[in-house]
Image: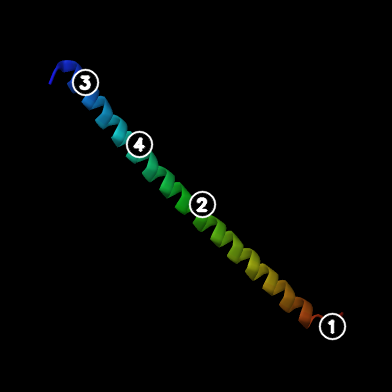
Amino acid sequence: MTRLQALIASIEQATQLLDTAVEQQRAMLTLQFSQKITTAYQKVSLAEKQIQVKNTRSPNC
């Protein structure tokens, strides 16, 4: 293998490692985003249920 071929192989390896790192980071961020959305949705749903319960207990209804 010539020096140029070895250099190209090293660059390709480094590129693969960087691509893998980027994919892992993207997956982690996607998971965190999904968890935050799910938590926010659950909080909103709970708040809506609490408002509904308050409205049914209210003497104004």
Label whose residue precedes the other's in the sequence (3 or 4):
3
Q: Name the residue beneath numbered marker 1.
A: 59
Q: Name the residue beneath numbered marker 4.
A: 19
Residue drawn where x is 53% and y is 56% of the image: 36
From the image, which quarter does the C terminus lie in? bottom right
Label whose residue precedes the other's in the sequence (1 or 2):
2
- Measured as percent of width and height from the top left, residue 47 is found at 67, 68
Q: Name the residue beneath numbered marker 3.
A: 7
Query: Would residue 14 be found to the left or right of residue 42 on screen?
Result: left
Q: Name the residue beneath numbered marker 2.
A: 33
Query: Would residue 39 be found to the left or right of residue 8 on screen?
Result: right
- Measured as percent of width and height from the top left, residue 3 is found at 16, 16
Viewer-nearest of discs 3 and 1 = 3
Badge 4 element: helix
Which amino acid lies under the numbered mark 4 shown in the image of this protein?
Asp
Badge 3 element: helix
Which amino acid lies under the numbered mark 1 shown in the image of this protein?
Pro
Label whose residue precedes the other's in the sequence (3 or 1):
3
Q: Nearer the viewer, residue 18 or 47?
A: 18
Which amino acid lies under the numbered mark 2 shown in the image of this protein?
Phe
Please tell me in which quadrant of the rendered image residue 49 appears: bottom right
CB atoms at circles 1 and 2 under 8 Å apart?
A: no
Viewer-nearest of discs 4 and 1 = 4
Badge 1 element: loop
- Measured as percent of width and height from the top left, residue 39 is found at 55, 61
Distance in Å between CA atoms under marks 4 and 1 = 62 Å
> Alpha-carbon neighbours of circle 4 within 10 Å: few (<14), some, or many (≥20)?
few
Which amino acid lies under the numbered mark 3 shown in the image of this protein?
Leu
Figure check: 54 above or below 10? below
Figure check: 47 above or below 35? below
